[in-house]
Image: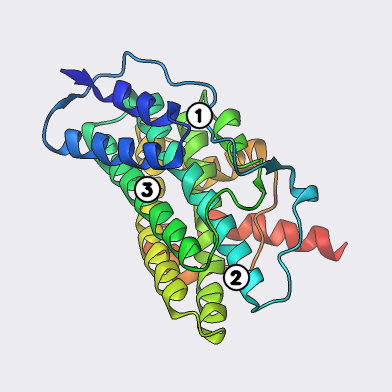
Amino acid sequence: MTPVAAACRDVLLHADPYAKVKAARAAVREWRRGRLSHDFGVAMPDEPGRPEHPELLPPNRMPRRGRAGSERSRIALLHALAHIEFVAIDLAFDMVGRFGRQFPREFTDDWLSVGADEAMHFALLDRRLRALGSWYGALPAHAGLWEAANGTAHDARARLAVVPMVLEARGLDVTPETVERMQGSGDEPSARILQRIYTDEIRHVGFGTKWFEFSCESDRIMPETEWRMLVARYFRGIVKPPFNDSARSRAGLTREYYAPLANFAKNRQDF
């Protein structure tokens, strides 16, 4: 029987976006049908496969998106989100293949379901881009999204703290406003896609919090304190408001985690 880690590695190594989506869906389907073993004897690659396009640029070289509400701006935003979802496919399967041996089988169930969601999100966004006369790869994209994976490749708890509990949680903060902007521009199809992604991401952040707390409880340490320590060590940005406290709370990510960091960021800005 094929190890689940081998299926995860296969997803990661695919460079073509559509092949990666197809491999992701196949891996999840095979796992759910009991055709993959709960075995992690296959190493994950340091870097996933990437297509020739989009061109990957550092944040300070990314072009402006254009006038807010314009079709050009909406296409640029959807392209940026498609790239986030494309990288998120790899992050989910790397989570399973790299750290699954450290957790119960349910961890693999959860993160493979996340991988299936991210593949679906990418496909929806790419389809929407094509309906608007563009496609994934037509514009440059942010080069730094895999940095969080590289920096936490040795530590499951750090990966959970940074990727779902900081990066994906930030999506919960900003997506409702983005949905409203799409609706205000008359782009209901894009708004519906982003609303679907938002709903799914609450569950993803919830998985991050769930397994982070499981790991902390196993070692008898306070999760909120451990999270703040790991974020300070491994996250290069600043955890700052505004926060969607309601969505974060639904995911189990309560203010006890992030309020002290947010207060620190505010005090530093005021100074």
In depth, the one of 45 and 187 nearer the eye is: 187
| Up/down of 103 relative to 85, above or below | above
The residue mark sitting in front, 3 or 2, is 2
Q: Residues within 10 Å of mark 3 (few under 14, many from 20)?
A: many
* Residue 37 as seen in the image, left or right of residue 226: left
Q: Which residue does the image show at 46% across and 36% down from the upper left? A: 16
Q: In percent of the image, x 59 and y 66: which residue is there?
A: 75
Is 211 left, or right, of 84 in this rendering?
left
State the residue at coordinates (41%, 37%). 216
The amino acid sitting under disc 1 is Pro
**Secondary structure category for the residue under label 1:** loop
Asked if residue 194 is positioned above or below residue 142 in the image, the reply reads: below
Nearer-N-terminus badge (2/1): 1
- Label number found at residue 119: 3
Verify CB contact (< 8 Å) between mark 1 and mark 3.
Answer: no
Where does the image place residue 260, in percent across and percent down from the top left?
A: 63, 57
Residue 170 visible at all: no
Disc 1 target residue: 48
**Which mark is first along the chain, 2 or 3?**
2
The amino acid beneath tag 3 is Ala
Figure quadrant of residue 188 = bottom left
Which SS class for mark 2?
Answer: helix
- Residue of label 2: 74
